């Protein structure tokens, strides 16, 4: 797991090298003139879909949403001009495969984002994008998560470029991502190890984030559950005030992604209140006044893209989950009860 976590900057660089394939796919997809996108997946792949859909909507002005694959099967969106983006490392997860088959019946064009283009999903979808990770040995998804998220972000960006011009500043920010990921991998590992050490003295965990950071927190919390069998709740930052506040006491650890954006002052206020109720607050931020205010924190490099900090924060949370498991005497490479993908009979 940890070597694949450390590989992510190289994976990002590889995705950028093959960027023309993503642009070509966008060109092909746009021929069907889709008005909206629905991204589906299960587990980590669903969270990747959520982050991709967030950027589509809020950075690229595309009408986009994410659904767990099963929800797409049971409650497909009503839109008459949809494309389906199906995210799956394996290309074999039952619900995601079935979602693409339903899409075909509904004459909705589908795009597979997978590490295995020869999988049933890769073969059956109208288009297929290889997320470029090669093989991922770990059962727990790490590089495949960030790779499918980045591929879906770039696909959204290319689609938006076909609809409107003048996005060069975003282009430059995206192109910096392999470098940014490298800075995060080098800069945060020791801090993540120290945070994991502190977390071992706590007994309950809450992850908080807004916007793309909410999807990132869902993934960070899933890593903790998968590798350490620990329960961990996830909330949109201000939502925490509306009931969950009752959970706060000594022994509760709060990991919060706090980027330097419009959410910052609310996050700062809430974290202060949480600490005053006895919680151990652990911010992940590139804002010194936030990280300096707490004994345990993860200071993200100063020069990373603020817009894409949520995606880069996942790397820090993967490291926290890894060291938390190791520190507890667990082997994150052999998580109990988990397989690389789940097949159930979802075809009926
Ligand atoms: C998705 C997934 C993983 C999860 C577990 C089972 O697989 O739900 O996110 O960690 O190992 O499979 P895939 O559809 O991306 O192959």
Image (tube, rainbow, N blue to C red):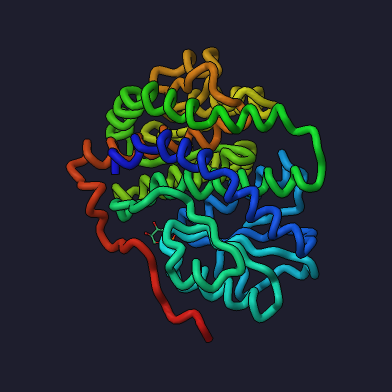
Q: Is residue 268 visible?
A: yes
- Relative to residue 91, is residue 83 drawn left or right? right
Placement of the N terminus among the 4 image quadrants: top left
Q: Quadrant of residue 10?
A: top left
- Relative to residue 117, is residue 335 drawn left or right? left
Image location of residue 11, percent across then percent down: 42, 40
Residue under the point 48% across and 39% down? 207
Residue under the point 20% across and 46% down? 330
Nearer to me, 176 or 78: 176
Residue that extends furthest to the left in the rendered view of this protein: 329
Nearer to me, 59 or 165: 165
Which quadrant of the frame does ligand 1 lie within? bottom left
- Relative to residue 298, is residue 25 drawn left or right? right
Q: Is residue 235 visible?
A: no
Nearer to me, 198 or 136: 136
Tally the marks.
Answer: 0
Image location of residue 110, percent across then percent down: 63, 67
Residue under the point 32% across and 42% down? 4
Image location of residue 137, percent across then percent down: 29, 52
Residue under the point 50% across and 42% down? 15
- Relative to residue 1, is residue 341 drawn left or right? right
In the displayed structure, 181 sits above or below 245; it is above
Nearer to me, 214 or 58: 58
In the displayed structure, 264 sits above or below 225; it is above
Image location of residue 16, percent across then percent down: 53, 39
């Amino acid at each position: 797991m940890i070597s694949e976590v450390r590989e992510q900057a190289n994976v990002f660089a590889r995705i950028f090298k093959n960027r023309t394939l993503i642009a070509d796919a966008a060109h092909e997809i746009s021929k069907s003139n889709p008005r909206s996108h629905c991204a589906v997946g299960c587990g980590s792949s669903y969270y990747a879909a959520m982050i991709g859909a967030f950027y589509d909507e809020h950075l690229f002005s595309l009408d986009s949403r994410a659904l767990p694959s099963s929800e797409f099967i049971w409650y497909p969106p009503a839109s008459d001009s949809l494309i389906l983006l199906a995210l799956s490392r394996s290309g074999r997860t039952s619900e995601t495969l079935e979602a693409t088959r339903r899409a075909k019946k509904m004459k909705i064009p589908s795009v597979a984002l997978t590490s295995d283009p020869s999988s049933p999903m890769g073969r059956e979808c109208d288009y297929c994008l290889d997320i470029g990770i090669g093989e991922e040995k770990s059962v727990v998804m790490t590089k495949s998560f960030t790779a499918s998220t980045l591929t879906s972000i770039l696909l959204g960006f290319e689609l938006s470029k076909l609809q409107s011009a003048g996005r060069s500043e975003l282009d430059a920010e995206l192109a910096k991502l392999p470098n940014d990921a490298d800075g995060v991998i080098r800069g945060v590992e020791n801090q993540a190890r120290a945070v994991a050490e502190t977390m071992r003295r706590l007994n309950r965990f809450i992850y908080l984030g807004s916007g793309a950071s909410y999807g990132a927190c869902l993934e960070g919390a899933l890593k903790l559950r998968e590798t350490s069998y620990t329960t961990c709740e996830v909330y949109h930052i201000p939502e925490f005030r509306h009931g969950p506040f009752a959970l706060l006491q000594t022994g509760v650890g709060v990991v919060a992604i706090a980027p330097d954006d419009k959410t910052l002052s609310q996050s700062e206020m809430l974290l202060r209140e949480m600490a005053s109720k006895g919680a151990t607050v652990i911010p992940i931020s590139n804002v010194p006044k936030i990280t300096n205010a707490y004994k345990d924190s993860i200071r993200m490099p100063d020069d990373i893209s603020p817009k894409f900090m949520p995606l880069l924060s996942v790397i820090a949370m993967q490291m926290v989950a890894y060291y938390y498991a190791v520190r507890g005497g667990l082997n994150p490479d052999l998580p109990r009860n988990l397989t690389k993908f789940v097949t159930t009979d979802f075809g009926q």
